[in-house]
Image (cartoon, coloured by chain):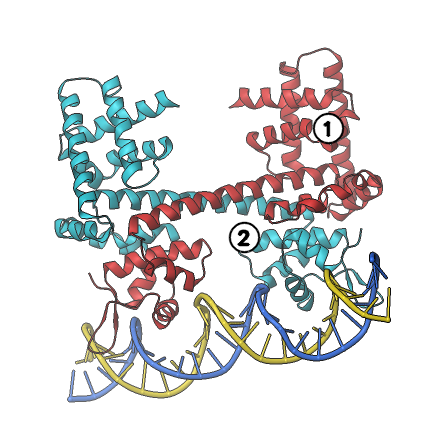
Chain colours: A cyan, B red, C yellow, D blue
Amino acid sequence: MAYTVGQVAKLAGVTVRTLHHYDEIGLLSPSGRTAAGYRRYDDADLERLQLIRYYRELGFPLDEIAAILDGPGADPAAHLRRQHELLTGQIGKLQEMVAAIELAMEAKRMGIQLTPEERFEVFGDFDPDAHAEEAEQRWGGTDAYRESTRRAARYSKEDWLRNKAENEDWGRRVAAVMDSGAPADSAAAMELAEEHRQLISRWFYECSYEIHTGLADMYVADPRFTAYYEKIRPGLAAYLSEAIHANAISRA
Amino acid sequence: MAYTVGQVAKLAGVTVRTLHHYDEIGLLSPSGRTAAGYRRYDDADLERLQLIRYYRELGFPLDEIAAILDGPGADPAAHLRRQHELLTGQIGKLQEMVAAIELAMEAKRMGIQLTPEERFEVFGDFDPDAHAEEAEQRWGGTDAYRESTRRAARYSKEDWLRNKAENEDWGRRVAAVMDSGAPADSAAAMELAEEHRQLISRWFYECSYEIHTGLADMYVADPRFTAYYEKIRPGLAAYLSEAIHANAISRA
DNA sequence: GTTGACCCTCACGCAACGGCAGGCGGGAGC
DNA sequence: GCTCCCGCCTGCCGTTGCGTGAGGGTCAAC
């Protein structure tokens, strides 16, 4: 089978100009030309273009792609295998970024200040020794910052008051259930965990059960989040965490 | 807290030049300068930079990022929420690409020719009406193409012969087990499924149990792959598929 | 035979920085 | 006080990966 530039462009989802460019730099030269000088691409060219597109999607510059494709010891199967590995690596990276975003969302929801390192460590290559030196400092002056952070969000004043009221109401009720001695996997505790999830979803961001259990783990693992709940009632962080897990399992 | 360009650059994993550039175009201007003209970034600047980095990672051009960040109705929480959605979308796209790579790997392993549409449909925006018109043609002339595809791989001739021999040996034995009337979830069938997986891993690409069950589904869903196994023994495609699933479950 | 879609080759333009030159600032050690 | 080195400053030109015409040939159809 032979294809013209336009056909290849449509098939591969690139522009004709891109194919011209690849021809110019010798990355993908069509296997032949017609008498009139039209480029003719065959199936082998398409296969090469497929590899190019994947490497491009993975962020490789064109000259490196050329080196990889034309270099020795690289049969087509090895390329696919390599691309498979790179892709799964990218997915892992994106999942870490998602987790970092969830952390940032939850921190904002509670008015907790993130350290600069936490903001950026997901992007990799950050300096490890810059981490410990400010570990103390981040526990000071939180209150003023919290207020300013809250003001930054563009909710109306009434919205904020309503949200605050709902939050406090929920806090009172969950403290009462805990005081009553009901276990964390009781229907009452799970119901309040579910309400917690819906409260987040309504006011801040869509909180799936998966995200919710992720938050639950964070509440016991990160002292700043723990402190937020311990202030309501000592032991509440762990209690809530367990209730959230129980609720997620029962709803699944 | 105030930071110099160099400190911010290190923290955020960007170059000083990039920060200069963002300042030049007004995307991220430091909140102040020292008497000597040094740029001074504060925590709000860092927060903005965090958002910028995420949007950049998601492929947005700088002018669009500026429009998004400075536009109305976009509080910080909304940005995080949006980035969360975009990221999960990207992950889904990459997972489709992984699946497409697995298809391509398996097709190559069996010497099956993929249609141009199949090569590129994962990249999206391909023409739907270009799909049906060649549906017949892809069933002709497969043998010659298969041979040429096989030669393309850079294995030595002996490698190929050994691989072929192992494959045929496996084919004989799985046919024998099937003929014996042993069910697909019997120990013998599962053992051959496991061997099938290791054979792929050794010769072609690391084949996890997850990938393996994906292949199993493909063997019954895609007639070209089905035909490959049916030629060994009628009913083998379904039999093998079931054995692979049973094997994966028992090893998990 | 002419119309419209498609192809060709220049050629300039643009985003998002990289990298270097040439010069100032600052703190620490002599 | 002087020097040394590192970090900061402002230009300014270079590069990658194309986008976007300009100006002109080609091909299948009507």
| Residue C17 place in picture, x, y as percent | 43, 67
Q: Residue A58, which numbered label?
A: 2
| Residue B147 place in picture, x, y as percent | 81, 42
Relative to residue A165, is residue A125 depicted above or below?
below
Which amino acid lies under the numbered mark 2 shown in the image of this protein? Leu
The residue lying toward the viewer, choosing from A233 and B247, is A233
Residue at left offset 70%, top offset 55%: A8
Which amino acid lies under the numbered mark 1 shown in the image of this protein? Thr
The residue lying toward the viewer, choosing from B59 and D10, is B59
Figure quadrant of the N terminus of chain B: bottom left
Residue at left offset 60%, top offset 49%: B125
Say which chain tag 1 marks.
Answer: B
The quadrant in which residue B40 appears is bottom left
Badge 1 marks a residue whose secondary structure is helix
Q: Are marks 2 and 1 in contact (CB under 8 Å)?
A: no
| Residue A155 place in picture, x, y as percent | 23, 48
Q: Would you call the spot at circle 2 few (<14 residues within 10 Å), some (14-19), or many (20 or more)? A: some
Q: On the picture, is A56 further left or further right than A179?
A: right
Badge 2 marks a residue whose secondary structure is loop
| Residue A103 place in picture, x, y as percent | 31, 43
Relative to residue B110, is residue A40 depicted above or below?
below
Q: Residue B72, which numbered label?
A: none
C-alpha span from label 2 to label 1 = 32 Å
Q: On the picture, is D18 further left or further right than B118?
A: left
Residue at left offset 74%, top offset 11%: B180
The residue lying toward the viewer, choosing from B223 and D6, is B223
* Circle 1 residue: B226
Q: On the picture, is B96 further left or further right than A123?
A: right
